[in-house]
Amino acid sequence: MNTKIVIIHEENKRDSLNEAGKVIRQGGIVAFPTETVYGLGANALDSDAVQRIFIAKGRPQDNPLIVHVANFAIEPYVQNIPEIAKKLMERFWPGPLTLIFNKTDRIPSTTSAGLDTIGLRMPANQLALELIKEANTPIAAPSANRSGRPSPTDVIHCIEDLDGKVDMILGGETSDVGLESTIVDCTTIPPMILRPGGISLEELQEVDPSIIIDPYLTTPLDENIKPKAPGMKYRHYAPKAPMKLIDLGSKTGEGIKVLAKHYSNDHKKVGIIATDETKKNYLYGNVYSIGSRMNLKDVAKNLYDILRQMDSDQMEVILAETFEEKGLGIAIMNRLKKAASYDVITDYDTIEAILSLGN
Ligand code: TXA
Ligand code: MG
């Protein structure tokens, strides 16, 4: 398939959005910027169009899509709007918050992956909003990456993954938030966070203190507990190299140093995810700073880009520092843990064992 790639600027904006809107109306698929990550959109009400997204991404069929809207008139798509959802929409839309509702028949089961519920979100990015208006229909859009790869925060990432597989790629600004939206299930009491993201638990609890986090997210190693968001079970956001998170408190730097030396001596290309505060401490390995610990917004914004850079620099082992699980730190750690397949080193004995046994 020939993919039309358009980098949007003031002069070509109207015509390009007009064309992209038409592609969506006619059943095509278009990658576009949002403030969280780039999305791959299709008419949410057109089952065949939505099916094309699954094929282009190589996405498992049991993983439902989020539907993007440009106004608050969501009644045609949802059975009812609980009071809590009204408050959350008022406070956080447009923005990085997806709300789960019981769906109506207007939403085909391809979009909801057979569930009776649907996730809705109003993005804050202006191009995204204008595209939805031009298309004149809600747009179903997962992140615009091939399934399993880190999510795209720049048009370059979309081109890497989807050139030749989609009708159109629209390039706008890099994603400001850099992590996907927070998903809150409003069909349950209490409402539950199914995926941490751009809006923190603390911000949500200002609106309703009863909101809790899906227990799956805090006990990820228990195979008997299943996530309510089907997508959370996949090894996602992952770089190609095996990755370890090192969380040894004051000894974290030392642990990373000895492991980096160990793997370097083993002739492996080691990538280290450090911070502005610590990047100068490491002598072995290729050091990537993810931003300052004082500014978690920057850390969130840089995360996926750094994972992709490590792929293109062909790192063979990745060692990463960790962040306190508070505020945006909850979402950042969720993505890092997934990227590392939950390989978190929390005691020095594990490091000693790696050094003596080698692995
Ligand atoms: O920020 C975002 O949400 C981005 C941008 C493009 O808007 N989209 C995004 O979509 O992250 P995706 O497909 O990569 O992730 C959607 C997640 C999956 O984990 C999926 O299982 C969950 O949302 N989800 C969607 N509908 C759901 C539903 N009805 N119930 C539970 N989880 C749902
Ligand atoms: Mg995704």
Image: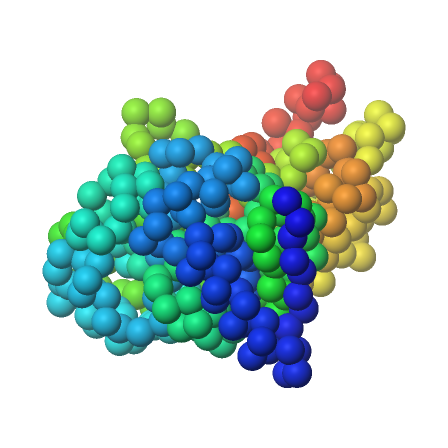
- Asked if 128 appears above or below 300 in the picture, the reply is below
- Asked if 176 appears above or below 254 in the picture, the reply is below
State the residue at coordinates (35%, 25%): 223
**As rendered, which of 197 and 101 lies closer to the eye?**
101
Name of the residue lying farthest toward the front: 26
- Asked if 16 appears above or below 10 in the picture, the reply is above
Name of the residue lying farthest toward the bottom: 10
Is 198 left, or right, of 274 in this rendering?
Answer: left
> The C terminus lies in which quarter of the figure?
top right
The quarter holding residue 211 reads: bottom left
**As rendered, which of 232 and 16 lies closer to the eye?**
16
Count of labels in the image: 0
Q: Position of residue 18 (x, y in %)?
A: 52, 72
Q: Position of residue 83 (x, y in %)?
A: 13, 67
State the residue at coordinates (38%, 39%): 63
State the residue at coordinates (31%, 74%): 71
> The N terminus lies in which quarter of the figure?
top right
Let me know if residue 98 appears in the view.
no
The quarter holding residue 68 reads: bottom left
- Asked if 139 appears above or below 54 in the picture, the reply is below
Q: Position of residue 305 (x, y in %)?
A: 66, 54
Q: Position of residue 160 (x, y in %)?
A: 69, 48
**As rendered, which of 257 and 320 lies closer to the eye?**
320
